[in-house]
Amino acid sequence: MDTKLVREITDWLKTTDLAEFCYDNNGECIEIKTQEALPQPTQFFCSLTPVCAPAIGIYRAAEKGKNLLLTEGQPIKQGDSLGLVETVSKKHKLTAPVDGTLRVIAAQEGTAVEFGLPLFFIEK
């Protein structure tokens, strides 16, 4: 395709309010889209704050000999304990990052977790 023709088409397109243009001439086809024609990413708002695993390891609700009973719907304060993730060399404490209501408990005692896996969701 002739680059001069492409340049002329793009210059012309800038003077219009068209978002996209398709040109076909004997099998030679060009499709031009402006920024306005590109799909916009979906944006959403969620009132749930995830609490994610800080490391790869095993989720424990509490230290040995202690008991921590968490239930969906219970009020949570920032800094409250949500258990820990045990790795080979360290125990990573999980704490609530915000005040709110514990809405989802995805963590199960003694299960393996991956780094970044959401274990809890707190509604602000």
Image (cartoon, grey):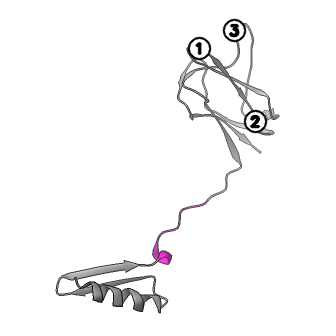
Residue 70 position, x and y percent, is 73, 25
Q: Secondary structure at mark 1?
A: loop
Q: Does residue 87 appear to the left or right of 94 in the view shown?
A: left
Q: Earlier in the sequence, mark 1 or mark 2?
A: 2
Asked if residue 54 is among those painted magenta in the image, a careful observer would answer no
Residue that badge 3 annotates? 64
Q: Residue at x 27, y 84 (%)?
A: 3
Is mark 1 in CB contact (under 8 Å) with mark 2? Answer: no
| Mark 1, residue position | 89
* Secondary structure of the residue carrying numbered label 2: loop
Depth order, front residue of 10/123: 10
Label drawn at residue 73: 2
Mark 1: amino acid: Ser
Badge 3 or badge 1: first in the primary sequence:
3
What residue is drawn where x is 24% and y is 81%? 29
Quadrant position of the C terminus in the picture: top right
In the rendered view, tell whether residue 83 sits above or below residue 34.
above
Q: Main secondary structure of the magenta part?
A: loop
Tell me the mark number nearer the camera, choosing from 3 and 1.
1
Mark in the foreground, 1 or 2: 1
